[in-house]
Amino acid sequence: MVGFAVSINGWIWVSTEGRPPVPVVPRPNEPLWEVRKRDHVIRCSLRYRGEWGVEVQLFRDGVHFGGMRFQTHTKAMAFAEEERVQHVAEADNA
């Protein structure tokens, strides 16, 4: 069996197909919405994780405080919308 091994950032990747793996080009986060709650700003963005799906990331005043990963963009967008509705409701009640 012919294989190929390459070290990327300290990790060893092995391919049995005889060619190196295709490097993944990172995509910038996709900002979705921003809500002001009292004296804080809550932001939501999408981060694409390649074959691992799409991650919804939540930030409070620029600091990551939560997130969830989904297999499809549609499910990630539905979750982000649920979070937006919840945060807007909380901001209106503040």
Image: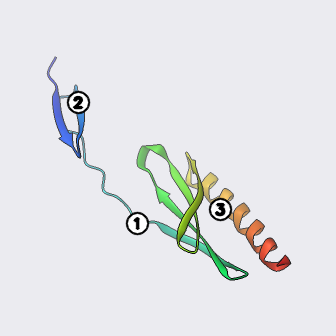
Q: Nearer the viewer, residue 36 or 23?
A: 36
Between 29 and 92, the one lying in front of the other is 92
User: Toward which corner of the image does residue 11 lie, by quadrant?
Assistant: top left
**Whole-percent x, y for residue 40 in the image:** 65, 78
Disc 1 residue type? Pro
Image location (x, y in percent) of residue 27 = 38, 62
Separation of marks 2 and 3 at Cα, in angstroms: 36 Å
In the rendered view, tell whether residue 1 sits above or below residue 38: above
Colour scheme in the image? rainbow
Label drawn at residue 28 = 1
Which amino acid, by three-letter code, is at mark 2? Val
Q: In the rendering, which numbered label is found on residue 4?
A: none
Q: Residues within 10 Å of mark 1 (few under 14, many from 20)?
A: few
* Residue under the image location 53 percent in, 68 percent down: 63
**Residue 34 to residue 54: above or below:** below
Does the CB distance between marks 3 and 1 fall below 8 Å?
no
Q: Earlier in the sequence, mark 3 or mark 1?
A: 1
**Comes first in the chain, label 2 or label 3:** 2
Secondary structure beneath dot 2 equals strand
Task: Determine which of the numbered discs, if any, sits on residue 14 in the image.
Answer: 2
Q: Disc 2 to disc 1, how far (Cα)?
A: 27 Å
Instruction: Single out the residue that lies furthest toward the right.
Output: 93
Whole-percent x, y for residue 80 in the image: 65, 62
Residue hosting label 3 = 80
* Residue 31 in sight from this viewpoint: yes
Residue found 43% across the figure and 44% down from its top: 51
Identify the mark nearer the N-term, 2 or 1: 2
Q: Position of residue 70 (x, y in %)?
A: 57, 48
**Residue found at x 76% / y 68%:** 85
- Asked where in the image residue 79 lies, by quadrant, the reply is bottom right
Specify few, some or many for label 2: CA neighbours under 10 Å numbering under 14, 14-19, or 20 or more.
some
